[in-house]
Image (cartoon, helix red, strand yellow):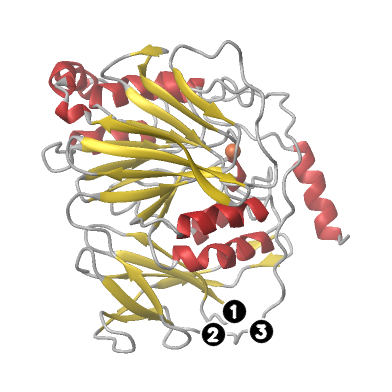
Amino acid sequence: MGCQNLILILIVSVLISSACCSSANDYIRPKPRQLLHFPWKYHTSSEPQQVHISLAGENHMRISWVTDDSYVPSIVEYGTSPGHYSAKSEGESTSYSYLLYKSGEIHHTVIGPLNPGTVYFYRCGGEGPEFQLRTPPAKLPITYAIAGDLGQTGWTKSTLDHIDQCKYDMHLLPGDLSYANYMQRRWDTFGELVQPLASQRPWMVTEGNHEKEYIPLVKDSFQSYNARWKMPFKESGSSSNLYYSFEAAGVHVLMLGSYTDCDEYSDQYGWLKADLAKVDRKRTPWLLALFHVPWYNSNVAHQGEGDGMMSAMEPLLHAAGVDIMFAGHVHAYERSKRVFSGNSDRCGAVHITIGDGGNSEGLARRYKNPNPEWSVFREASFGHGELKIVNSSHAFWSWHRNDDDEAVKSDEIWITSLASSGCLADKAHEFRKILMGP
Ligand SMILES: [Fe+2]
């Protein structure tokens, strides 16, 4: 074992991850599947690696990739026919050091304007293989694949294979991506693992505790995550890559940060109020929110860790009429009724915990009993979710368990939007009151 690894293990062993108002727990996870082995591959120093894409404002897409060579231009050529690139964009690149590790050159290039629901062929850095992506549709329906806490194990591969079989427009990831856990090379292997999917459909992510990689007095939090997984925070008026929003096909999606300040005087809260004030439910009848630490969780694991964020933000998100909130962190699946302030509420949000992507820590099998009145379905299995928003009033949610490596649909439900229920009119006064507050 190298000196760097020993130092890292010591650091990991003494650091306790803390959420925006979290508490420790004594949960012991069962055995996971093996970490995947990534054999060494030859590639030229300018060859694009770890290609992934994300939305970057209206009708634009950010292409991100890594090269060994820092002199490779951050250009992306693209067009709607294979091998014929009618347009070209130039972006920027960065790199970072982490103890003895030095990253490759990380390129971020925004392309567009792009037509909705269209396949584009693209090439990174002026050479190398051609990739293709499909932009989200302009109008409903739209389908999201959703899985958090992915990691890079045999279970992760199973989850990704199942998502790959699904006809979806975008991947939503509520935190905990690579489980690099300070081993920076694992960010590279995670990028390699997800490239086949993440180079084709936008991956919209928010941060989990495993993205922090904080070393007191030595390293700030989220250095690797922010350098590699740049999200459209500037495009949505946010000052931090840790929280932002985006819109696609009649849906406004809030990507919130469980690991940054969230009280009513915080930047995140101020940004959230301003962002929600601009939402037009006639144009985007559906409102979704994602964050890492669940607020409604009847698993023994991570009990109470989301309480601080929940007490700070739930009144605002409820008044704004969020339809569904997705979280990860707990390595299991759970779906609630519409709920607010701890109780069923026909105008509240459906909460779904989907931290079941397949990471190396295994499943969270122990549940509190009896299960709370608001909890509809809970199961400790790896899997993924699919949300098909069909029209302004109806969406179909299904959860697919990785059962013996075959995706088995285990939970499904039609969800009716708050915009079609009359609830938004009931909440309008409360929403205005909160917006006028501090
Ligand atoms: Fe987590």
- Sequence-wise, the earlier of marks 1 and 3 is 3
Residue position for label 3: 42
Q: Name the residue that disc number 1 marks.
A: 68
Question: Taking the image as drawn, is residue 126 in sight?
Answer: yes
Gap between marks 3 and 2 measured at Cα: 12 Å
Identified by mark 1, the residue type is Asp
The residue that appears at 56% across and 20% down in the rendered structure is 304
Instruction: Name the one closer to the observer, 73 or 24.
Output: 24
Q: Residue at x 71, y 26 (%)?
A: 27
Is residue 376 positioned above or below 237 on the image?
Answer: above
38 with respect to 90 (left or right)? right
User: Of the residues shown, which amino acid type is indicated by label 3?
Assistant: Tyr
- Quick check: marks 2 and 1 in contact, CB under 8 Å? yes
Mark 3: secondary structure: loop
- Find residue 46 and name its label: 2
Label 2: few (<14), some or many (≥20) within 10 Å? many
Which of labels 1 and 3 is toward the front? Answer: 3
Q: Is disc 1 in contact with disc 3, using a CB cutoff of under 8 Å?
A: no
Q: Nearer the viewer, mark 3 or mark 2?
A: 3
Label placed on residue 375: none
Quadrant position of the C terminus in the picture: top left
**Rendering coords of residue 315 (x, y %):** 32, 19
Ligand 1 within 8 Å of the CB at mark 2: no
Residue type at the position of mark 2: Ser
Look at the numbered disc 1 and give the secondary structure of its residue: loop
Residue 414 is situated, as x and y percent measured from the top left of the image, at 30, 33
Q: Nearer the viewer, residue 65 or 425?
A: 425
Q: Nearer the viewer, residue 5 or 115?
A: 115
